[in-house]
Amino acid sequence: MWNSIATQISQVTGKLFHATHQRPVGGGSINRAFAISDPDHRAYFVKLNDASCLAMFEAEALGLQQIAATQTIRVPLPICWGTTQGSAYIVLEWLDLGYGTHRAWAAMGQQLAAMHRVASPQGFGWERNNTIGLTPQINAWMSDWPAFFAEQRIGYQLQLAQQRGGHFPQAAQLLAAIPQILAGHQPLPSLVHGDLWSGNAVVTQLEEPVIVDPAVYFGDREVDLAMTELFGSFPNDFYRAYDQAFPLEPGYRQRKLLYNLYHILNHFNLFGGSYEHQANQMMATLLSGH
């Protein structure tokens, strides 16, 4: 397998590469991740999954390329992707990671704000479906943000959750309330990362901010800010710099709960367990205010 991947790297880069060293590295709960290198100390980051996951890696590569093209915030550049010996793979640029300083987190906020100013004239959605974790993420273009979020985010996750056996007695009521929850809010269709929790925001040894593992689409930029607060917030330097560069609109705190419900429902679909109870609590809170 490694010889096949090394051959593909050689063809794409135009430089002969032999994967003489491979070692497992941290890469989340979805994929197996490896660092591979050659005798000249050139290194790449490789993610592996079942061959059926090739479309997931294709969409990830396209998303990384789209973010990189904005020249706003750094991402690991995709080198190549494909299948070999029953596995799908994606090869990414290797980045030497360090620890986030005050300056690095402030730069992260400024650069994410710049990325969020990149908007789509086609409205909300993306050119293809992708995944959020291993869950399909539907991105059909729509001009109406509340309808997009109700149908293609919360509604789709609820369908999957109910198929999984989840019990959400207020689901229909919540879906009907989304236009009221988002009433008066007219966001730009911003390029968003889509899965921006703390594990997907890193810093290089040169203090350069990097975002990884995107689930990109064009949506309300607040979905990214909301998720940064879901599993432990980013440092205050990040939020202060973001708000200076691109101030948030009134009502964000109320919308944040709705936007994060999407990820809690997805976690139920991926992992089950207590996420069902958490999702129902979030629905009750959202409905109590409307």
Image (tube, rainbow, N blue to C red):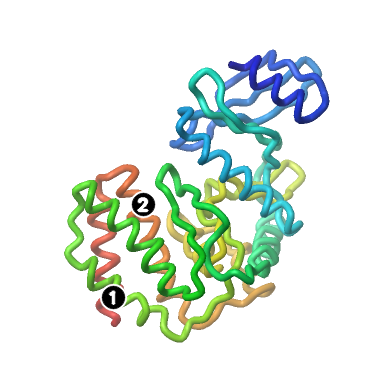
Residue depicted at 32% across the width and 42% down the height: 271
Is residue 146 visible in the rendered image? The answer is: yes
Which one is in front, 109 or 32? 32
Residue depicted at 52% across the width and 18% down the height: 85
Under tag 1, what secondary structure? helix
**Residue 203 placement, left or right of 258:** right
Quarter occupied by residue 92: top right
* Marking on residue 266: 2
Judge whether 194 appears above or below 248 on screen: above
* Marking on residue 176: 1
Is residue 241 visible in the rendered image? The answer is: no
Spot occupied by residue 265 in the image (x, y as percentages of width and height): 33, 55
Residue depicted at 40% across the width and 61% down the height: 153
Spot occupied by residue 243 in the image (x, y as percentages of width and height): 62, 73
User: Which amino acid is tagged 2?
Assistant: Asn
Mark 1 Cα-neighbour bin, 10 Å: few <14, some 14–19, many ≥20: few
Label whose residue precedes the other's in the sequence (1 or 2): 1
